[in-house]
Amino acid sequence: MHRHLTGRAGKLPWTRSRAYRKNDNAHCEQKNWTHVRQLFGHDRFGHPELVGLMNDLYAREWSQFTNHFKPTFKLVKREKQDGKTKRVYEKTPQTPYQRLLASPDIPEATKVKLRATHAGLDPFALKKSIEVKLKKFFTALGNLNREATKLQ
């Protein structure tokens, strides 16, 4: 991510919220519950040794599982009625994979690659692999925490 953002011709500002919106942080981090907190919890991890384990889990199993097998409802519109906001969502949820296949903007060659990738995925095997990696992660975290308390 850092390499992508710093290697651009026009530099992007590093900010956590939109300009002049001091209470905007909730919107910037709106997917933290589904993408981070449900997986790792609310703890803060202060050991740099864990970054590789987290990145590996996100890059491989977790992204495949969430993009191919976890459907979400998309907000269609918002309506203001009597001072309240009524949200209207689509009737049936779709996975990001299904949304890409339905999009006319995606080239057919990309859709063929996506279908091939999807055909090779097993949601049960992905879930099991996620659980194994999470167990390995939390075991390593426990060992690092134990070593840190011994040194103090």
Image: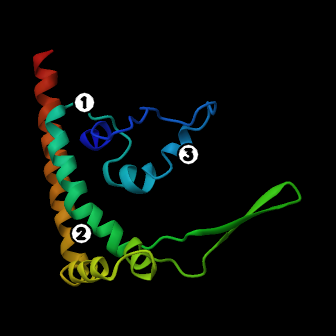
Residues at marks 3 and 2 touching, judged by CB atoms closer than 8 Å: no
Image coordinates of residue 53 in percent, x first then y, are 16, 47
Residue 110, quarter of the rendered image: bottom left
Q: Given the current orientation, which residue lies at the most extreme front position?
A: 9
The C terminus lies in quadrant? top left
Which label number is shown at residue 4? none
Distance in Å between CA atoms under marks 3 and 2: 28 Å
Image coordinates of residue 87 in percent, x first then y, are 70, 65
- Viewer-proximal residue among 106 and 95: 106
Which label number is shown at residue 46? 1
Please name which of the two marks, 1 or 3, marks the residue nearer to the observer: 3
Of the residues under marks 3 and 2, which one precedes in the sequence? 3
Residue drawn at the location 59% of the way across and 38% of the way down:
24
The N terminus lies in quadrant? top left
Residue where numbered disc 3 is placed: 27
| Tag 3 secondary structure | helix
Of the residues under marks 1 and 3, which one precedes in the sequence? 3
Residue drawn at the location 29% of the way across and 62% of the way down:
63
Q: Given the current orientation, which residue lies at the most extreme top position?
A: 152
| Tag 2 secondary structure | helix
- Viewer-proximal residue among 47 and 58: 58
Residue where numbered disc 2 is placed: 127
